[in-house]
Image: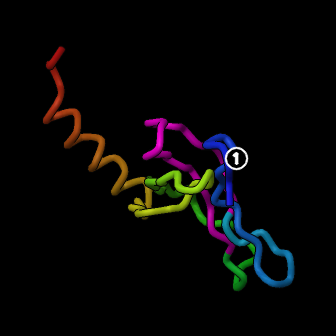
Amino acid sequence: MAETIEDLTINYEDEEGKLVVKELTKEILTRGSWSTIMFLYQDYDPKTGDYSEPKITIRRYRKSGGQFRQQSKFNISGQKQALQISDIIRKWYGGQE
C-alpha cells in the first residue's frame, strides 16, 4: 500500500513478472484524505504481444491508517469515449468563469 499520493500507481505485473497494466502518466486531481487521480495506461494483450491503445482510468483513494486505499474507479475505454466525455464537460462548463 502507498503511503503518499505520489507513490500510487496502477502498474500491475502478473505472476510471471510481465507488466500487464502499464501506467504511462498520471495527474493528481485532488489531494487530501480523499484523493482523486487520473491515469493514462495501456493493457498488455498476450495474444498479440502488444499493448493496447492508451486508456484512461479515474480512481478515488481514501487515506486510512497512513495508507491510501482505492475506493472507486471509472475506466474510459478509449479515445472515442474520452472525447465524448470531454465534449460534454465543455458544453456544460464552457463559457463559465
Residue 9 point in image, percent of width and height: 66, 54
Residue 90 point in image, percent of width and height: 22, 33
* Residue 96 placement, left or right of 43: left
Q: Main secondary structure of the magenta part?
A: strand
* Residue 85 placement, left or right of 8: left
Query: Which one is in front, 37 or 84?
Result: 37
Q: Which residue is located at x 49 percent, y 46 percent?
A: 38
Q: Which residue is located at x 17 percent, y 29 percent?
A: 93
Q: Which residue is located at x 44 percent, y 54 percent?
A: 60
Residue 76 point in image, percent of width and height: 40, 59
- Quadrant of res 41: bottom right
Residue 18 point in image, percent of width and height: 82, 74
Vertical placement of residue 21 versus 37, above or below: below
The amino acid on which the numbered mark 1 sits, given as a three-letter code, is Asp
- Boundaries of the magenta span: 22-44
Q: Residue 39 colored magenta?
A: yes
For mark 1, what is the residue? 7
Specify the quadrant that holds the N terminus: bottom right
* Residue 52 placement, left or right of 57: right
Colouring of the image: rainbow
